Image (spheres, helix red, strand yellow):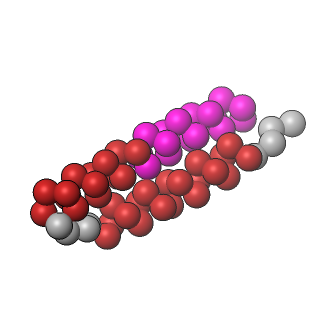
């Protein structure tokens, strides 16, 4: 369970960072925000916070 927690944390962190980079690049180059990437970043960020705060006994 401990390994699953860290795998979930790392994968969600990577997805969150990639989504935020895509949003930044699209906004800076096209002045357009693609909302599915924003939603993906927010959901991944929430999963990251929950996975980090989850206590494995």
Please, which residue is most extreme toward the top here? Answer: 3
Q: Nearer the viewer, residue 7 or 30?
A: 30
Q: For the magenta stretch, what is the residue range?
A: 1-16
Residue lying farthest to the left in this orientation: 30
Q: Point out residue 40 in the picture as x, y percentages from the top left corner.
A: 41, 60
Considering only vertical position in the picture, is 23 above or below 17? below
Q: Nearer the viewer, residue 5 or 17?
A: 17
3 magenta-colored:
yes
- In the rendered image, residue 47, in percent from the top left (x then y), is placed at 58, 53
Who's the residue at 80% across and 38% down the image? 56
- Position of the N terminus, as image quadrant, is top right
Residue at screen point 13% across, 57% down: 29
**In which quadrant of the rendered view does residue 4 lie?**
top right
**Does residue 48 belong to the magenta stretch?**
no
Provide residue 12's location: percent of width, then percent of height.
Answer: 50, 45
Examine the image and state in which quarter residue 39 appears.
Answer: bottom left
Identity of the residue drawn at 26% across and 67% down: 34
Question: Is 36 situated left or right of 4 in this image?
Answer: left
């Amino acid at each position: 369970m401990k390994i699953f927690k860290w795998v979930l944390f790392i994968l969600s962190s990577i997805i969150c960072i990639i989504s935020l980079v895509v949003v930044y690049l699209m906004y800076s180059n096209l002045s357009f925000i693609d909302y599915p990437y924003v939603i993906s970043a927010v959901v991944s960020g929430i999963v990251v916070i929950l996975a980090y705060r989850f206590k494995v006994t």
